[in-house]
Image: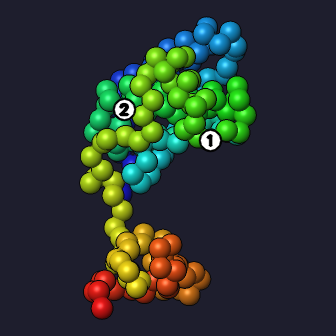
Amino acid sequence: MKTPRLPIALQQAVMRSLRHLLQLACEKLALLFAEPALVYQQRGTAAGTAWLEKWEIHLNPVLLLENQQAFIDEVVPHELARLLVWKVFGHVPPHGKEWKWMMQEVLGVPARRIHQFEIDSVRARTFPYRCGCQQHHLTLRRHNCVLRGESEYRCVRCKSLLKPGDYSPS
């Protein structure tokens, strides 16, 4: 899928939100933080990711276009909080008590770990595989690794090797 071109006004709205939240954090924490880079290249079903060491926020342009205000209200603070927590507390669980505190008390946003956006437009094609107990769906990348003999995958439940094909209980 080709990455859509985002309207300048939408990119500016995202940046305004980021700057507002960053200023709020600087004031409430009495610390200075550099402005993180925004990268609109997140793919798949993730709305965004925080790249801690690079001090970047990667955003999914497809989901942003489809869920503009909700994305700005939820995803931008979520990923900024991840960066801020890393700077203030170091390596801690990604959505632990520090992140919840940062979201709610510092940024004033409800702490939700996952988005509720419709993802049909970004869902990757999957391939059916089976084990002894259930059906699995492997991504194109993992499917190709199996075909090339580079990887094999096991079910975490029954530990048997995944085989291509639909599941049919014995």
**Nearer-N-terminus badge (1/2):** 2
Q: Are marks 1 and 2 in contact (CB under 8 Å)?
A: no
The residue under label 2 is 71
Q: Which residue is mark 1?
A: 93
Q: Residue furthest right?
A: 90
| The quadrant where residue 32 appears | top right
Q: Amino acid at mark 2?
A: Phe
x, y percent for residue 149: 56, 87
Look at the picture and state if 135 lies above or below 48: below
Residue at left 54%, top 16%?
106
Q: Image quarter for residue 83?
A: top right
* Side of 41 where 90 appears, left or right: right
Q: Residues within 10 Å of mark 1 (few under 14, many from 20)?
A: few
| Picture layout, residue 17 above or below residue 6 | above
Residue 12 seen in the figure: no
Pair 1/2: label in front: 1
The N terminus - image quarter: bottom left
Alpha carbons under labels 1 and 2: distance apart? 23 Å
Q: Nearer the viewer, residue 107 or 60?
A: 107
Q: Residue at x 59, y 83 (%)?
A: 150
Report if residue 94 is visible in the image.
yes
